[in-house]
Amino acid sequence: MSLSPLLDDLVDALRCLPGVGQKSAQRMAFHLLERGRDGAGILADTLARSLVEIGRCDSCQTFTEAPVCAICRDERRDSSLLCVVESPADLVAIEQSGDFHGHYFVLLGHLSPIDGIGPADIGIPRLLKRVTDNGVQELILATNPTVEGEATAHYIADRLLVQGVSITRLANGLPVGGDLGGADGSTLSHAFRGRRPLSG
């Protein structure tokens, strides 16, 4: 029996979030209505504004309110380096590491022929044009180490082999603080293939 059709709608709406099932959505809905109405109002207003005002950067395809995002506008960044990632979340993760000071191109996912997602759907023609038009010297393929991510990286690399651009791939392997005994064979294999000389 339903206590409130609108409450049911709220629970169903919250279930659109990743990892949120029926019980979690119900807890969130009750919390917002019982103790968090002010926060819920702010959340609703911010979400509504975000859906209207946040779009994609004309240059790299990440989320931004401006036509071109702050990273693409930053003249201090190295325009000869271009890092390709699958999502804005991946871009944020790399930025938080503080190790990369080039530019980005955010694919709109990865190639997945089984789902009907081809190169044009994720912006690969735009990426190839950007590489050739902007004098990119090194293209870093930082797609996820999944079957689809690897296929996407290889597809992009194949299209640029004749362009004279250095193409690199992030090494996949052991996490910092991890131990060899806890790693699976595939992870160890990637770690060995991606090994680099130890600098003193």
Image: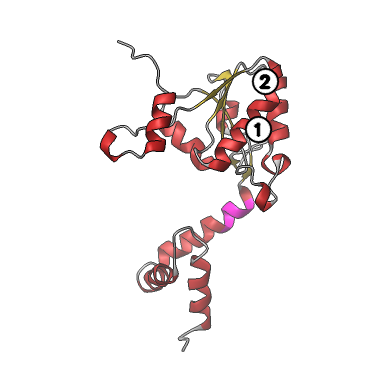
Kindly tell me whether residue 12 is visible in this rendering. yes
Reading the image, the residue beneath label 1 is 155
Whether residue 188 is situated above or below residue 34 in the rendered picture: above
Secondary structure type for disc 2: helix
Residue at point 59%, 28% (across, down): 72
Residue at point 67%, 41% (across, down): 122
Within 10 Å of disc 2 (Cα), the crowding (few <14, some 14-19, many 20+) is few
Residue interval drawn in magenta:
48-52
Q: Position of residue 13 (x, y in %)?
A: 53, 68
Pick the residue in front: 18 or 143. 143
Residue at point 36%, 74% (across, down): 34
Identify the main secondary structure in magenta: helix
Q: Quadrant of the C terminus?
A: top left
Secondary structure type for disc 1: helix
Q: Residue furthest front?
A: 185
Residue at point 44%, 59% (across, down): 19
Q: Is residue 41 left or right of residue 121?
A: left
Q: Is residue 125 left or right of residue 173?
A: right
Q: Is residue 114 left or right of residue 95?
A: right
Kindly tell me whether residue 106 is visible in this rendering. no
Reading the image, the residue beneath label 2 is 161
- Which dot marks residue 187? none
Cα–Cα gap, marks 2 and 1: 10 Å
Kind of residue indicated by mark 2: Leu
Q: Position of residue 198 (x, y in %)?
A: 33, 14
